[in-house]
Amino acid sequence: MRLPIDPQADPSRRAWLPCPVCDDARHCETCASRRNCGDHWRYLISNNGPVLHLQCPRCTHAWSLNTRPGTTR
């Protein structure tokens, strides 16, 4: 089941992190070189301190990620 894009999603608020479901950036040279790719970005829905709430525009998967140093991803 695909989720709808979150109503808080704004294309101007982006994050460049791999999607844990579709991994669409797997073969992208730009992403592999850790540069901001124009095709493989995620909606940054919100954040609570170091915890980011993201949604993939391609597969619509939504997830949260703790970016605090020392936490496992």
Image (spheres, helix red, strand yellow):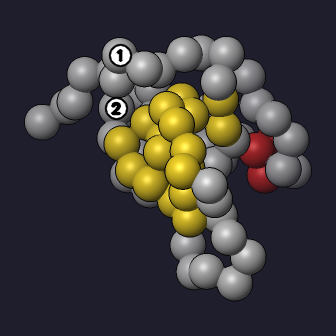
Read off the residue under disc 1.
7
Q: Quadrant of the C terminus?
A: bottom right
Residue 1, quarter of the rendered image = top left
Label 1 or label 2, whichever lies nearer to me, is 1
Relative to 5, is 28 on the left or the right? Answer: right
Relative to 7, is 34 on the left or the right? Answer: right
Residue under the point 61% across and 43% down: 25
Residue 70 location (% of width, % of height): 69, 84
Whether residue 23 can be seen here = no
Q: Give 58 or 63, whichever is nearer the viewer.
A: 63
Crowding at mark 2 (Cα within 10 Å: few <14, some 14-19, many 20+): many
Q: Give 14 or 56, whichever is nearer the viewer.
A: 14
Crowding at mark 1 (Cα within 10 Å: few <14, some 14-19, many 20+): few
Q: Amino acid at mark 1?
A: Pro
Q: Amino acid at mark 2?
A: Thr
Whether residue 71 can be seen here = yes
Read off the residue under disc 2.
60
Q: Secondary structure at mark 2?
A: loop
Measured along the vertical axis of the image, is residue 60 above or below residue 47? above
Residue under the point 86% across and 41% down: 35
The extreme front residue here reads 49
Mark 1 touches mark 2? (CB < 8 Å): no
Q: Secondary structure at mark 1?
A: loop
- The earlier-in-sequence mark between 1 and 2 is 1
Relative to 1, is 50 on the left or the right? Answer: right
Count the marks.
2
Measured along the vertical axis of the image, is residue 10 above or below residue 41? above
